[in-house]
Amino acid sequence: MWWPAVVAGVAALCVAALALVVGASGGSPASAGGPASISVPADDSADAGFARDMSVHHQQAVDMAFIVRDRTDDAEVRLLAFDIINTQANQRGMMTGWLDQWGLNQTSAAPPMAWMHMDHAYRAHDGSLMPGMATNTELAKLRSARGKAAEVLFLQLMVEHHKAGVSMAEGYVSLGQNAVEKRLAETIVSGQTSEIKLMTDMLAARGAKPVG
């Protein structure tokens, strides 16, 4: 039974996220000192770029989790959705908070993932701004689905979403300068890699498989 593992994962990730803030600030979570207490990155840095882009990426994952939560009674899928909502909303709040503390805008004129300094050969289309992000058409399909169909589509979309999120986080670990933000990226890599395996197994249990 994987429920206890997922619940434990939620708790562990929330504790880890809290520790990142407390450890960086040397004070209470309310001070949210985070990376701002270490250094203020440049607007075009990997530190700022990752915080912006992963915040956008996380927000769509949260949105998809809310959608499927209301379209199935399946306890496994609803618990996974709860995990994604809580973990990624928490992490997103940390990253947007850091940008505020750094005195940087939440958005940038630079193309998404430009901070990675490589050609991703990806063109934003139909609302999908970065690799792994669902299109508006796919989101509309998810909203119209119910039951098992919604579960399968959600899991397929989220596997691709997580794969791209892991790649982005790994890219930041290689390029970033901020130790605290790197620890968050490493948490994302570990957590989402584990969830990819979980979701692949859940798809198999439903007679389906990832699309990629």
Image: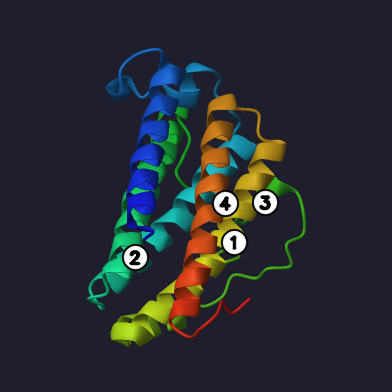
**Residue ID for mark 3:** 114
Q: Nearer the viewer, mark 2 or mark 3?
A: 2
Q: Residue 203 vs residue 109: left or right?
A: left
- Point out residue 47 in the picture as x, y percentages from the top left corner: 59, 36
Name the amino acid type tagged 3: Ala
Mark yes or no: residue 34 visible. yes
Marks 1/4: CA–CA distance: 25 Å
Name the amino acid type tagged 2: Ala
**Residue ID for mark 2:** 65
Name the amino acid type tagged 4: Ala
Q: Quadrant of the C terminus?
A: bottom right
Mark sitting earlier along the chain (2/1): 2
Is there CB contact under 8 Å for labels 1 and 3? Answer: no
- Point out residue 35 in the picture as x, y percentages from the top left corner: 50, 25
**Residue ID for mark 1:** 163
Residue in the image at 37% along x and 78% along y: 151
Q: What count of labels does the image hold?
A: 4
